[in-house]
Amino acid sequence: MSGQIEQTFVVAVPVERAWQAFTDSEERSQWEAPEYEIDPRPGGKLRWTIPPHPAVDGEVLEAEPGRRLVATEGTGVLDGVTRVTVTFEDAGTGTRITVVQSGFGTGAAWQDALESHRQGWARALRDLVLYLETGVASRRFFTTWRSQLGLCLADSPAGVRVTTVQPDSWAADAGLQPDDVVLFVDGLPIYDRTDLWPFQMARRAGEALEVVVARAGTQVKSRGVLRARA
């Protein structure tokens, strides 16, 4: 496997408080997954669930309090095992935290997963900073997805480019093709993959969505019907 995500940020709390947010089950349930259990000792087990996704199981490999936490995460959301390494540094006015998730494979589906997880981590960590600095557990990251689009995407300088289309899906209904660049959905501009996520949160299976893509030097408009989350 290859490929990784890295996020570094500073939060205005002491290292001890930041460490607790990653190693206490109740604390981690406030910002990363609504159901999170972790035994923060080498060999300890972890399990988290963000419904409707299946549970993800893992194991703590390293735990140096206030410095470094390393754990595996198994299949469930992803099709393989990845490793998450979190390091903590005193930044004077707070704590500098670096999160690295490694072990992503190659191919269109893995690339789609890597880029989606990169954006997912960015959102979850914003909820973490909000929680640690204000005490507000917004739980925005846990918002339920009601439908799915049925396609894999790759980020490109021009926008999000279709890489694969799943059969019996909104994308297949709409006739989307590899290399299409998604421009609009329901009249709203699409610049990156996160612009598509609200449609999957707010719209239900059975509803139709119109899409405009750039293809072979022209704009192509079509529509498809949303499917339920698998």
Image (cartoon, rainbow, N blue to C red):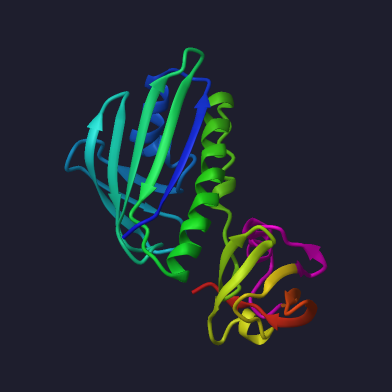
Q: Position of residue 66 (x, y in %)?
A: 32, 23
* 115 sits left or right of 159 in the view: left
Q: Is residue 58 magenta?
A: no
Let me know if residue 107 appears in the view. yes
Q: Position of residue 28 (x, y in %)?
A: 41, 39
* 162 sits left or right of 102 in the view: right
Span of residues in magenta: 184-207
**Residue farthest to the right, as pictured:** 187
Residue drawn at point x = 39 percent, y = 22 percent? 89
Q: In front here: 97 or 204?
A: 97
**Residue farthest to the left, as pictured:** 43
Q: Is residue 67 above or below residue 22?
A: above
Q: Is residue 192 magenta?
A: yes
Q: Position of residue 131 (x, y in %)?
A: 54, 31
* 203 sits left or right of 36 in the view: right
Residue drawn at point x = 60 percent, y = 67 percent? 146
Q: Is residue 113 above or below residue 86?
A: below
**Residue farthest to the top, as pictured:** 92
Residue drawn at point x = 49 percent, y = 41 percent? 31
Task: Locate the N terminus by quadrant.
Answer: bottom left
Residue drawn at point x = 80 percent, y = 63 percent? 188
Q: Is residue 214 above or below residue 20?
A: below
